[in-house]
Image (cartoon, rainbow, N blue to C red):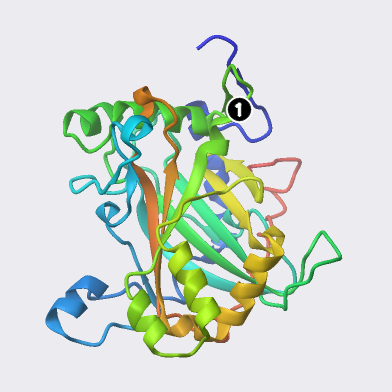
């Protein structure tokens, strides 16, 4: 489309992959991701079917068909559908919780990321996606912006599947071509002719599959229950409380919950003690705003399963310290 332009500082391009070998020299100095929080062995839905107790203090990857998305004719009929046959484009590889005294951004610099060797070099979209949810662990305040303080960093690392070839995925019905085009613009930080960045379309869709069971625990009041019901499946744009970071093989999305509206932060703080009873899903989607960009497709998803946010979590890993030979004026990130 005419008039489109590309950003600079946070742009990712396929050619950046050529820098990945040098960047990987830092891996031996980075923390291992995925060591502190296990993946669920039995999916939550299977536990409910078999009438067995779901696992606690773990994560999982909910299927893309659990989230209501804008259908092909949404702009006319406002109908949302669940895409039964489409899995998320990115596969969830690890989830880590880190504690810090203040918000920490660009976590991808600090943890060893999954290998991308089996993803073709000419892949047109970023092979890795890192999402860092920065959750405030202190009481909500009205005054004193910018807010910062004790933080729980919830770091999800995603990767394209080994051997990912976009055109093959489209042929097999696993990827919409219009979704691929939106993703390419998302990676390149493209701004359209109307001056709207593609990244402004990124939205989160929350879902709580055990919501009524959770409410029945009576660990919070009626006001909180009403808020949770209101949040169920309600999409919310990630902007403006977001920062992007780019490396040779990844894009990182830092979601700054510290900067959310006061009411949201207040309810989060009041619910913090009972999150260990909840199963919380989240999908990431690039919003379709024209008939040519529909139906929507889930980019990535995460499930936090009965995790106690008050538990002890490891501190944020330090930035890698370079060997003297590596430190001679080289910047691999």
Q: In which quadrant of the rendered view does residue 263 lie?
A: bottom right
Q: Is residue 241 left or right of residue 19?
A: right
> Residue placed farthest to the left in the image?
50
Rendering coords of residue 158 (x, y %): 41, 53
- Mark 1 residue crowding within 10 angstroms, few (<14) / some (14–19) / many (20+): few
Mark yes or no: residue 87 visible: yes
Q: Where is mark 1, residue-wise?
A: 196
Residue 270, compared with residue 295, is above or below; it is below
**Which residue is pictured at 47% across the width and 63% down the height?**
231
Residue 319, compared with residue 269, is above or below; it is above
Q: Looking at the image, which is closer to me, 176 or 201?
A: 201
Rendering coords of residue 306 (x, y %): 41, 80
Mark yes or no: residue 294 visible: no
**Which residue is pictured at 52% across the width and 54% down the height?**
131
Rendering coords of residue 111 (x, y %): 55, 60
**Which residue is pictured at 28% across the width and 83% down the height?**
54
> Residue placed farthest to the top in the image?
2
Q: In which quadrant of the rendered view does residue 22 lie?
A: top right
> Residue placed farthest to the right in the image?
144
């Amino acid at each position: 489309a005419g008039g489109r332009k590309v950003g600079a500082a946070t742009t990712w391009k396929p050619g950046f992959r050529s820098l990945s070998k040098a960047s990987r020299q830092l891996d031996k100095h980075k923390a291992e991701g995925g060591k502190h929080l296990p993946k669920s062995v039995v999916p939550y839905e299977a536990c409910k079917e078999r009438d067995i107790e779901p696992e606690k203090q773990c994560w999982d990857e909910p299927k893309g068909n659990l989230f209501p998305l804008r259908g092909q004719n949404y702009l006319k009929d406002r109908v949302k559908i669940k895409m039964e046959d489409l899995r998320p484009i990115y596969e969830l590889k690890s989830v880590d919780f880190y504690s810090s005294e203040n918000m920490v951004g660009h976590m991808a610099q600090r943890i060893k990321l999954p290998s991308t060797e089996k993803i073709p070099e000419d892949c047109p979209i970023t092979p890795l996606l890192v999402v860092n949810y920065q959750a405030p662990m202190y009481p909500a305040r009205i005054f004193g912006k910018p807010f910062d303080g004790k933080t729980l960093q919830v770091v999800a690392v995603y990767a394209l599947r080994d051997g990912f070839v976009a055109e093959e995925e489209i042929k097999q019905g696993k990827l919409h071509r219009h979704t691929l085009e939106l993703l390419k613009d998302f990676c390149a930080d493209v701004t359209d002719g109307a001056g709207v960045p593609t990244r402004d379309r990124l939205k989160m869709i929350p879902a709580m599959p055990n919501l009524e069971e959770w409410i029945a625990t009576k660990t919070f009041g009626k006001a909180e229950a009403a808020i949770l019901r209101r949040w169920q499946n309600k999409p919310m744009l990630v902007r403006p409380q977001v920062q992007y970071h780019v490396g040779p093989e990844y894009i990182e999305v830092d979601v700054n919950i510290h900067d959310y509206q006061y009411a949201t932060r207040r309810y989060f703080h009041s619910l913090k003690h009972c999150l260990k009873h909840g199963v919380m899903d989240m999908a990431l989607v690039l919003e379709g705003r024209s008939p040519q960009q529909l139906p929507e497709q889930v980019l990535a998803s995460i499930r936090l399963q009965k995790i106690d946010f008050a538990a002890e979590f490891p501190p944020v890993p330090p930035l890698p310290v370079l060997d003297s030979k590596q430190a001679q004026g080289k910047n691999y990130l």
